[in-house]
Amino acid sequence: MSIRSLTGVSQPAAPCEGAGESHGIETEEQRPRNIPAYTSPTEGFSLEVDAKIKSQHPTLEAAMEIGAELKRKFPMVQVTIYDAAAKTRTLVQAAK
């Protein structure tokens, strides 16, 4: 059994100038938060693709339009609209 020696071990890079500045803070505050998987929306209409909430819309017409377009492009997925006020789901048919 041979012993391997480590030669030429590099040193950690020195911090760059301005490394203490936070460049991503503004974008972090503007990013929308994801809906937790264990909660249901409380307002508006949600677009569900294969039983997973993908987007929320203020009106039923907006949600149906986007859902029908998705169903037209991808006919194999199940697309439903969840009405938070009535707590009901409506199956979306493909747009023609």
Image: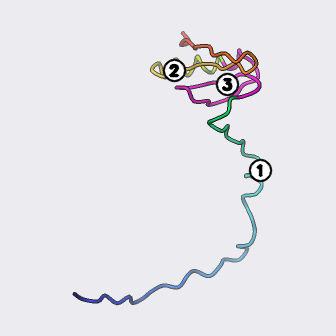
Question: Marks 2 and 1: which is nearer the front?
Answer: 2
Mark 2 or mark 1, earlier in chain: 1
Q: What residue type is labelled 1?
A: Glu
Q: Could you give the CA–CA distance between mark 2 and mark 1, rounded to whole angstroms?
A: 33 Å
Q: Is mark 3 on a helix, strand or loop?
A: strand
Query: Does the segment drawn in magenta span residue 24?
Result: no
Q: Position of residue 95 (x, y in %)?
A: 56, 12
Q: Please name the residue shown 52% across and 26% down the image.
A: 50
Q: Could you give the CA–CA distance between mark 3 and mark 1, rounded to whole angstroms?
A: 23 Å
Q: What residue type is labelled 3?
A: Ser
Q: Please name the residue shown 55% across and 20% down the image.
A: 79
Q: Position of residue 68 (x, y in %)?
A: 58, 16
Q: In this view, does 78 lie to the left or right of 40?
A: left
The residue beneath circle 1 is 29
Q: Give the range drawn in magenta.
A: 41-63
Quarter of image, res 13: bottom right
* On-image quarter of the N terminus: bottom left
Q: What residue type is labelled 2?
A: Gln
Q: Please name the residue shown 75% across and 69% down the image.
A: 21
Extreme-left residue of the structure: 1
Question: Is 32 or 50 nearer to us in this picture?
Answer: 50
* On-image quarter of the C terminus: top right
Question: Is 50 or 31 nearer to us in this picture?
Answer: 50
- The label shown at residue 78 is 2
Circle 1 packing at 10 Å, graded few (<14), some (14-19), many (20+), is: few
